[in-house]
Image (cartoon, rainbow, N blue to C red):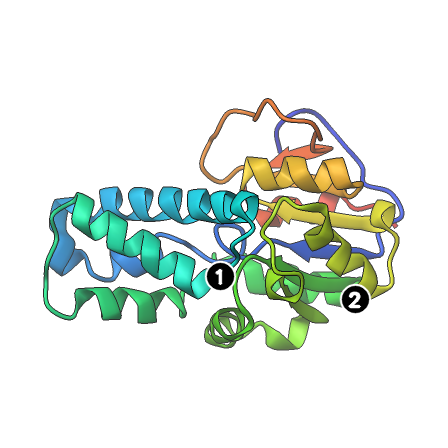
Amino acid sequence: MTGGPVELRDIGACVFDAYGTLFDIGAAAAKCHDILGDKTDALTDIWRSKQLTYTWLRSLMGDYVGFNQVTADALDFALETLAIDEAGLRDKLLVLYDELDAYPEVPGVLRDLKAAGRYTAILSNGVPGMLQSAVAHAGIGDDLDAVLSVEAVGIYKPHPSVYQLAVEELGVAPERICFLSSNAWDAAGAAHFGFQVVWVNRFGQKPERLPGKPMAEITNLAELLPLLSA
């Protein structure tokens, strides 16, 4: 863990972002490395960057479409930018995105949280079908109490109405929810809302200059459990 010892108090639920936090967003392109070659990492980076940008811009424009459409639009942008025009590749990548691999520590952490009597949930930009597919592929459905999508409110993170979904679904006050995200902007939004936030800084990023500060920073989810007090 980085940033010194921190203890999260009176946590009733642990709520996780999905993409980049539980599921490896680089896995889809990595499985097509035989086709993408030295463009594999660039495709992942452009695809993800444009995917997030489109969620923020559509939220500001008041023109919501589901994350599956945003993901496809961002992939089209990335493929055109890199001049990749391989027959069938687009469809293959989108199928693989619905079945992203979970990070290795995820199943064990969720099991331990459930064994300790805490609610667990996903709160994600993904549409329900995408999330259900990823959860099933990872085999973690039995250790989740809820899988929540922004589809219910028609706007993307970090709008406060998204974080409110977890409060309403789980019946746990914001200050008793530990929210975990690998996205620094998401961590900031959740902290600004009122959650106790742990930033899962998997990618060695620098802190955002935004309102809302995480209480702790870790490099993977296995470092969460020692932070939780009884």
**Quadrant of the image containing the N terminus:** top right
| SS assignment at label 2 | helix
Residue 210 in the figure: left or right of residue 12? left
The kind of residue tagged 1 is: Val
Q: Residue sitting at 25 percent across and 44 percent down?
A: 41
List x then y, in percent, for residue 138: 49, 70
List x then y, in percent, for residue 125: 55, 57
Give the spatial CA distance, label 1 vs label 2: 23 Å
The kind of residue tagged 2 is: Glu
Q: Earlier in the sequence, mark 1 or mark 2?
A: 1
Task: Name the residue carrying label 1.
Answer: 65
Let me know if residue 117 appears in the view: no
Q: Residue sitting at 76 percent across and 32 percent down?
A: 6
List x then y, in percent, for residue 85: 10, 58
Residue 204 in the image: above or below residue 37: above
- Give the residue at the far top of this rendering: 209
| SS assignment at label 1 | loop
Task: Name the residue carrying label 2.
Answer: 169
Let me know if residue 198 appears in the view: yes
Density class for disc 2 (Cα within 10 Å; few <14, some 14-19, many ≥20) is: few
- Pointers 1 and 2 in contact (CB under 8 A)? no
Residue 102 in the image: above or below residue 20: below
Q: In terms of depth relative to the viewer, which is nearer, 212 or 155?
A: 155
Number of numbered tags placed on the structure image: 2
Density class for disc 1 (Cα within 10 Å; few <14, some 14-19, many ≥20) is: some
Q: Residue sitting at 51 percent across and 77 percent down?
A: 136
Q: Nearer the viewer, mark 1 or mark 2?
A: 1
